[in-house]
Image (cartoon, rainbow, N blue to C red):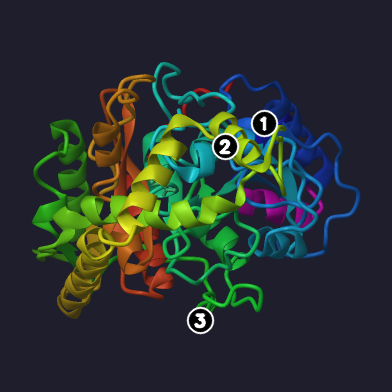
Amino acid sequence: MSQAVLELSAAQAAAQIRGGELAAEELFRVYRDRAAAEELGAFLWVAEEVPDAPADGPLQGVPVAVKDLFCVGDVPSAAGSRILEGYRPPYTATAVERLLLAGATVLGKTNMDEFAMGSSNENSGFGPVRNPWDETKVPGGSSGGSAAAVAAGLAPWAIGTDTGGSIRQPASLCGIVGMKPTYGAVSRYGMIAFASSLDQAGPLTRDVTDCALLLSHMVGADPCDCTSTGLPEDIRLPVAERLDGLRFGVPPELTGAGVDPGVKVVFDATVERIEQLGGSVEPVALPHAGHAIAAYYVIAPAEASANLARYDGVRFGPRAGHTDLLSLYEETREEGFGTEVKRRIMLGTYALSSGYYEAYYGRAQRVRTKIADDFRAAFERVDLIVTPTSPTVAFGLGERTEDPLAMYLSDALTVPMPLAGLPAISIPTGMSDGLPVGFQIAGPAFSENRILEAAHAIERAVGFDGAPPRG
Ligand code: GLN
């Protein structure tokens, strides 16, 4: 019975519950037991009880795994950081609240890089996550726990956040689907902040249909987040099987140097598939995309240094240094924050300091505008832009931890889109070295339905069917 349940996509499980063929409690129990027993390090907290009465809605009691940085009322929510250990927020993030209203239940909180800073999940204050395809490899980050949980069949689906790639890159490394929506589509209220002008929540799922279904219940303007806009049209479940009339752009800046040969082979094969499906493909220039990493690693740390100032041992989490106020601040932050978080606070504080502000932060913001302008010009010629999601497949645990720059380059292909506020999806389209390879499709702001339709057609044609063994 439980094996059959595991094979259902989340959309199929919801339909079976609606049709009376499957009990929501049964579904919850199967996943809860798996999540509680898992050994990948994907979960930081798992619900003990079967929720008694999920709301009556289209998600019909299907459980969702939630990245640890979403506040969930009275549930541990620490954003992967020791400085928030034991924090149980008194309220629930809007994105999660909307899912609950649609009938979903919270299965557990997933492991992540501390405050979403990382590309491998090795920066978690609570230990790394292992990739279910090969446990000596990383799952990607920062939503590594969510991605590993979905790939390993520990959760039907999950939500994460993406600031510079943290949904798409782990989805790619774990062979699942992950989507970062247009900035503002989903409320950030109740998401523990990293870089507020970039952070967006989105789904991590087994297939594109589940991605559309989950996203459709997350989006919407929210009076609690004045940067939220929702979407101009509802998210539809995608049906496309062809790509006739759609123009795809391939930017040489994001498909050439630095991309592993094995990843390139899969990318090129997928582009060929697009042409077979009736789509047209042409090169399109993104001249400033090569500067995205440099701009991002000024802007994101600058915003983080401001957002993280609130963790001082007074309001949240554990406290150290009791002799005087300054030692309380210093020792709490010294003990509570990990190395990468401290590095970002230093970088960001420096970039914002008077005298350096113009040279670093001001300049990075101008580069950001140029990147957004490049995309705007490109989308006058093409409907969608495609790239590999990650320059490499999953890398070894420990392989990049000593070299922050090598780690930062993991995001070279995903960072330009959030800098421009644009939506993008990653879908698995092949394997290299026995590990999954993700294909990224980006579109103009608010083009989620177009991206999902194209992703659906490509998913159908590629027929990627390589879930790792589900023990
Ligand atoms: N890996 C990138 C970083 O470390 C992106 C993280 C994210 O999207 N949250 O900042």
* CB atoms of marks 2 and 1 within 8 Å: yes
Q: Residue furthest front?
A: 324
Tell me, yes or no, if residue 457 can be seen here.
no
- Residue at label 3? 233
Q: Residue 320, image x and y in percent?
A: 68, 31
Q: Please tell me whether residue 18 belongs to the stretch shown in magenta.
A: yes
**x 42%, y 42%: residue:** 171
Q: Amino acid at mark 1?
A: Gly
Tally the marks: 3
- Report, in whole angstroms, how far the alpha carbon at label 2 lies from the one at label 1: 8 Å
Q: Which mark is residue 330?
A: 2
What's the magenta region? 10-21
Q: Earlier in the sequence, mark 3 or mark 1?
A: 3
Q: Residue 291, image x and y in percent?
A: 17, 55
**x 9%, y 42%: residue:** 257
Q: Earlier in the sequence, mark 2 or mark 1?
A: 1
Q: Amino acid at mark 3?
A: Glu
Asked which secondary structure carries label 3, the reply is loop
The quadrant of the rendering that contains the C terminus is top right
Q: Residues within 10 Å of mark 2 (few under 14, many from 20)?
A: some
Q: Residue 411, image x and y in percent?
A: 29, 45
Q: Residue furthest top?
A: 136
Q: Residue furthest bottom?
A: 232
Whether ligand 1 has any atom under 8 Å from the Cβ at mark 3 is answered as: no
